């Protein structure tokens, strides 16, 4: 068979033209990555409204203080009902100007390495794989605002940092964080390197998102760019992004959650300053005041690594065992996504110094408290009203009371935040027949409900 050379040449040119045009118009195309995706897509990735976040302080979580130590207790995290494991920073810690015994995990020496005290990249890969097998996502703590003073960027790219009039690199403005150097987010090369480093972990460890430290102080245009690029990596899987910040425009930047700073400080004042329980409703209104998407949620907690060390454990802050559970119910159910800090679920009474090695003694577990936590979380995992419903407050000075409603499902929550027996007057619209949310037993609600000290009641229709 003979070929017309001119025809074939013309055809090849046409194909090349069409190919180039198609490529130019493909808005979803992403730049070539230097990395190869490790692992398979996580098929059981929780939706953002379904998340129960469990914060792991690697130094404290096991006697070894390693990633393998976290892996060894994955079953206990799963049994609690959590489905998102948030690991505090896994990176090597800067030694220059180090604070505390081991230095702050938030003073990052190398964004693309594992702290050798914790293990290896392979250890993280295995941890993620094993968590996925148990239907739990893994997110890393990302420190974008600043680096350690012995990070290689300091000497290689001084212009990636903010400097004073004399050309000296500065610490984060308005802080006493002397162990870290402030990055310059007006430098495009630095921002590209930061996004590249975040991408590295999505590719090389198959992680499922980030909790972003100090998010309010990093420009939102950086977050928007970073999140857009990160979400294109896992085309068949969503990733979760939590801003450790309270700015409402974090949602516009692509974050799934903001941080309930105001909610936590309100709980503290309620107990320390004898503020009324109605202030929790006020806090909720404050945190959602500029949120224009009803699907957005604030992450709420009764402990985390910062407040556990500086302020106290939930047992110290919220009236002991019963009071701490009564406050956790509110944090878990009041228009929120709950976060648990390792150890609080067993009533661990010791503060955890995350600048040092302070292993949790799991043998001291209060099993009665652990059972309560599991019960509270289990109901949340079954309730669309709690996860995505509309909030209405009915609180008094002593009792945090509210309903969460989604379609035909209604949940009525009451939690006595005092150490006294109180009577709570029930509005006429909530009187009638209910079921105990935990046992299914029938409950008839009349004009008032009596609650014992720190008692909580959860009803459903």
Image (spheres, rainbow, N blue to C red):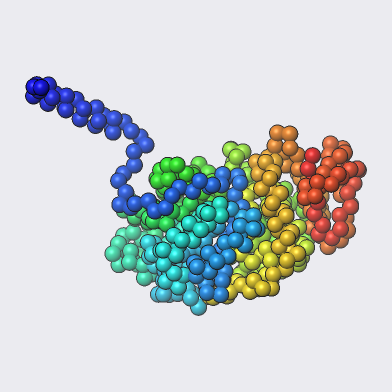
Decide if residue 14 is on the left or right side of residue 52.
Answer: left
User: Horizontal and vertical percent for residue 9?
Assistant: 12, 26
Where is residue 340? Give x, y as percent: 63, 59
Above or below: residue 175 compared with residue 197: below
Name the residue located 81 percent from the left edge and 59 percent from the top edge. Answer: 454
Mark yes or no: residue 15 visible.
Answer: yes
| Residue 314 sits above or below residue 21 on the image | below
Looking at the figure, which quarter contains the N terminus?
top left
- Front residue of this view, candidates 198 and 274: 198
Residue 60 horizontal side relative to residue 423, left or right:
left
Q: Residue at x 69, y 43 (%)?
A: 383
Residue visible at 53% across and 69% down? 69
Is 378 situated above or below 122?
A: above
**x and y, in percent, of residue 422 in the image:** 88, 55
Quadrant of the drawing holding the C terminus: top right
Q: Which sits in the foreground, 416 or 186?
A: 416
């Amino acid at each position: 068979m003979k070929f017309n050379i001119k025809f074939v040449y013309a055809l090849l040119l046409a194909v090349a033209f069409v190919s180039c045009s198609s490529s130019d118009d493909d808005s979803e195309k992403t730049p070539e990555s230097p990395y190869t995706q490790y692992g398979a897509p996580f098929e059981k990735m929780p939706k953002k409204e379904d998340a129960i976040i469990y914060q792991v302080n690697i130094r404290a979580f096991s006697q070894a203080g390693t990633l393998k130590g976290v892996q060894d207790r994955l079953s206990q995290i799963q049994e609690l009902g959590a489905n998102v494991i948030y690991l505090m920073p896994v990176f090597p810690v800067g030694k220059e100007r180090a604070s505390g015994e081991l230095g702050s995990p938030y003073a990052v020496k190398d964004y693309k390495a594992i702290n050798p005290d914790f293990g290896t990249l392979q250890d993280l890969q295995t941890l993620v794989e094993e968590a996925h097998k148990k239907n739990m996502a893994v997110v890393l703590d990302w420190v974008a605002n600043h680096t350690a003073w012995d990070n290689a960027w300091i000497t290689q790219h001084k212009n990636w940092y903010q400097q004073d009039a004399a050309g000296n690199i500065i610490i984060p403005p308005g802080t006493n964080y002397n162990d870290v150097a402030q990055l310059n987010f007006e430098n495009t090369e630095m921002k590209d390197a930061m996004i590249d480093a975040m991408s590295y972990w999505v590719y090389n460890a198959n992680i499922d998102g980030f909790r972003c430290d100090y998010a309010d102080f990093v420009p939102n245009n950086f977050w928007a760019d970073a999140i857009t690029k990160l979400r294109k990596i896992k085309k068949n899987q969503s990733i979760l992004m939590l801003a450790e910040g309270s700015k409402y425009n974090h949602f516009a930047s692509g974050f799934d959650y903001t941080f309930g700073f105001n909610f936590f400080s309100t709980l503290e004042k309620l107990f320390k300053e004898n503020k009324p329980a109605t202030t929790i409703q006020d806090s909720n209104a404050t945190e959602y005041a500029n949120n224009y998407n009803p699907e957005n949620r604030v992450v709420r907690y009764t402990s985390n690594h910062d407040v556990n060390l500086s302020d106290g454990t939930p047992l110290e802050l919220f009236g002991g065992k019963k009071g701490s559970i009564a406050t956790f119910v509110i944090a878990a159910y009041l228009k929120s996504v709950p976060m648990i800090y390792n150890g609080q679920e067993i009533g661990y009474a010791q503060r955890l110094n995350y600048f040092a090695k302070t292993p949790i003694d799991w043998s001291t577990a209060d099993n009665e408290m652990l059972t309560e936590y599991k019960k509270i979380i289990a109901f949340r995992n079954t309730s669309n009203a709690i996860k995505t419903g509309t909030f209405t407050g009915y609180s008094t000075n002593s009792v945090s009371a509210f309903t969460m409603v989604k379609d035909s499902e209604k949940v009525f929550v009451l939690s006595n935040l005092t150490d006294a027996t109180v009577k709570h007057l029930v509005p006429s619209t909530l009187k009638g027949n209910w079921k105990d949310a935990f046992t299914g037993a029938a409950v008839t609600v009349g004009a008032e409900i009596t609650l014992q000290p720190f008692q909580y009641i959860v009803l459903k229709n």
